[in-house]
Image (cartoon, helix red, strand yellow):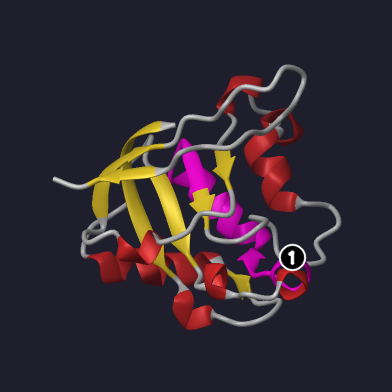
Amino acid sequence: GYGDAIWLDVSNCYGPNKVITAKDLKEAEFRTGTSIQPNDIVLIFTGWSTVKDPSQYALQHMGLSKDAGEWLREKKVKTVGIDNCNVDACGELTLPVHMNFLRPRSLGLNNNDFIAVIENLVNINKIPKPRFTFSGVPIPYIGKTGGQVRALAIVN
């Protein structure tokens, strides 16, 4: 994805298996002094990217609640990036945020209404301003559903 972006700091919720709610995102948005606009790319800094143990990183990660995913959809964002391995909360076997973002037909929406997901981002908290331009174009793999991106924050 490429375009207007905002980053939200929810590191105050930091901890193993912690769930980030819509309320947490609203409070983080308020703290930026600006607001999410339609078609924004939203990067979420949980602090989980600082975890060094691979097993803990993968098996006790933080993630978004179902209502947090719904709130981001209501905001009409086009991409959500997060600094951990999964946008969904740890142990959420039905993957409600993935289903909301990547399978819009499950909500009765058009398949083109997907919200792209970028996981395993780092250094979100080093972006010096809440609003910036984001560039993160994936490498296309034939027959696959994901690929690496070179994530760049372009700050004016």
Q: Is 149 or 34 nearer to us in this picture?
A: 149
Instruction: Please identify the residue farthest to the top as the structure is shown.
Output: 142
Within the image, what quadrant is residue 130 found in? bottom left
Within the image, what quadrant is residue 108 found in? top right
Picture coordinates of residue 52, whole percent (x, y): 62, 75
Within the image, what quadrant is residue 28 found in? bottom left
| Region rendered in magenta | 57-80
11 above or below 138? below
Instruction: Please identify the residue farthest to the left as the structure is shown.
Output: 156
Identify which residue is drawn at 45% across, 39% down: 150
Picture coordinates of residue 100, whole percent (x, y): 67, 42
How many numbered tags mark residues here? 1
The amino acid type of the residue labelled 1 equals Ala
Which image quarter holds the C terminus? top left
Mark 1 highlights which residue?
58
Instruction: Please identify the residue farthest to the right as the structure is shown.
Output: 93
Identify which residue is drawn at 23% across, 58% down: 34
